[in-house]
Image: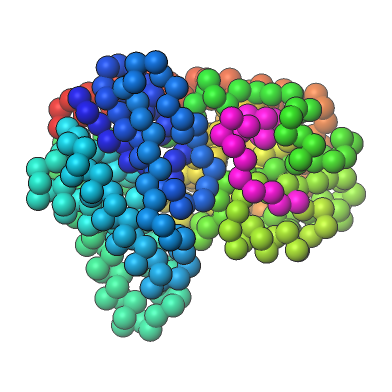
């Protein structure tokens, strides 16, 4: 079977799935955006069979997600490039993952017209987040019309896909309202590639770039900072740690406007750009505590995949997020701490951080890795995707 696995973001576990599908004899083309900046997986074809190809799809213009007009133009161009790839490469099936909503809708309509089966790997309810943003930018009547249009577009994706793979049970409630056939829906939680992200020594090739003082408690946030995250909590965290007399440093591995702004807001907060995929384990391993953020209005349909990578890295995790999010459940099961995503939650996390010592960091980290090994079964996930793809 010839498969296009189009993960717009190019994240680690999607790249692992592409490799595993190729190992099973499929011919796989993994496609991602060349312009979208984020933490990437290993996007290099290293199999000897020649059955796996990685493609970075470029439209030769920057991805300006905060400019509605520029983004619309970009998504149209990206959709055209993706459609051209599908048209010329003659795939048997197409997996759509993380593609922006407007581009995804155009690609889906083309796929349906031309009889190309496709699987909608649904990572977030994009129309909900976009509608919230629209309400902050447009007058109420226009925002209401726009929100209904966005909802209909995403409903089309779910209804018309050959199969929908959702990352959590909460998605199925939305599908009921959209009229999606439950027989064409599978819930497959995300995971992290355990072979690629292993526990690493605190002192490793990435440590010097990320941290200076070995005596301080090292905190690290790694990943995008978008509408679902409140970066001000990172500044608040450092201020509260200083007030409590806890020597600490916080490094943010990210890029974009929010990350750039953080670099000027606190002297004990360092910001560096995204690191190569092969350095991810060292990046995470250089910290004592890994930090995750999620805003309350995103908790129903967003499960931070960075938490899964953190667990695989075998480090204690501090999550500032609603306690009902599945990632929060994983953090607590791993021995980490979850606080509400506000000042009170930050304040409530300080005692836990202050009490950490070398022994507890080691013990909690080992527990996090153990939970990851128990939960993340990439072979079983590949079995399920293989079955879905063969039945489309």
Q: Position of residue 215 (x, y in %)?
A: 89, 36
Q: Position of residue 315 (x, y in %)?
A: 67, 30
Left or right: 347 in relation to 327: right
| Residue 182, picture quadrant | top left
- Residue 272 falls within the magenta-colored stretch: yes
The region drawn magenta spans 270-285
Out of 215 and 257, give the one closest to the viewer. 257
Write the residue at 51% across / 39% down. Answer: 40
Write the residue at 36% across / 82% down. Answer: 140
Write the residue at 67% across / 39% down. Answer: 290
Q: Position of residue 296 (x, y in %)?
A: 51, 57
Asked whether residue 310 appears in the rendered view, the answer is: no
Out of 335 and 113, give the one closest to the viewer. 113
Write the residue at 15% across / 27% down. Answer: 391
| Residue 28, picture quadrant | top left
Q: Position of residue 57 (x, y in %)?
A: 37, 47
């Amino acid at each position: 079977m010839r498969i296009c696995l189009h993960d717009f973001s190019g994240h680690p576990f999607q790249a692992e799935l592409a490799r595993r599908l190729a190992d099973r004899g499929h011919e796989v083309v993994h496609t991602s955006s060349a312009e979208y900046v984020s933490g990437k997986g290993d996007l290099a074809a290293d199999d000897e069979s020649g059955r796996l190809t990685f493609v970075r799809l470029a439209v030769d213009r920057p991805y300006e997600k905060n400019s509605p007009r520029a983004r619309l133009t970009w998504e149209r161009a990206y959709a055209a490039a993706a459609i051209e790839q599908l048209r010329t490469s003659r795939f048997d099936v197409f997996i759509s993952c993380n593609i922006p909503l407007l581009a995804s809708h155009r690609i889906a309509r083309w796929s349906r017209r031309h009889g190309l089966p496709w699987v909608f790997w649904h990572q977030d309810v994009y129309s909900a987040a976009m509608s919230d943003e629209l309400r902050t930018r447009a007058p109420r009547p226009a925002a209401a019309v726009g929100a209904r249009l966005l909802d209909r577009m995403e409903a089309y994706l779910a209804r018309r896909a050959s199969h929908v793979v959702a990352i959590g049970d909460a998605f199925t409630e939305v599908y009921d309202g959209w009229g999606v056939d439950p027989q064409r829906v599978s819930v497959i939680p995300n995971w992290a590639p355990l072979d690629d992200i292993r526990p690493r020594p605190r002192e490793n090739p990435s440590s010097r770039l990320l941290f200076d003082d070995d005596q301080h408690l090292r905190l690290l946030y790694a990943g995008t900072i978008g509408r679902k995250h409140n970066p001000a909590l990172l500044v608040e965290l450092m201020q509260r740690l200083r007030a409590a007399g806890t020597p600490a440093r916080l490094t943010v591995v990210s890029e974009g406007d929010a990350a750039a702004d953080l670099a000027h807001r606190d002297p004990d907060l360092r910001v560096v750009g995204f690191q190569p995929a092969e350095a991810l384990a060292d990046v995470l391993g250089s910290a004592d505590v890994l930090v995750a953020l999620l805003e309350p209005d995103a908790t129903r349909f967003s499960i931070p995949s960075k938490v899964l990578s953190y667990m695989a890295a075998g480090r204690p995790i501090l999550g500032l997020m609603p306690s009902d999010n599945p990632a929060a459940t994983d953090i607590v099961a791993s021995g980490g701490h979850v606080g509400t995503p506000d000042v009170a939650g930050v304040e409530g996390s300080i005692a836990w951080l202050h009490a950490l010592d070398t022994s507890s960091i080691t013990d909690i980290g080992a527990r996090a890795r153990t939970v990851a090994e128990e939960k993340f079964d990439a072979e079983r996930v590949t079995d399920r995707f293989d079955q879905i793809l063969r039945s489309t």
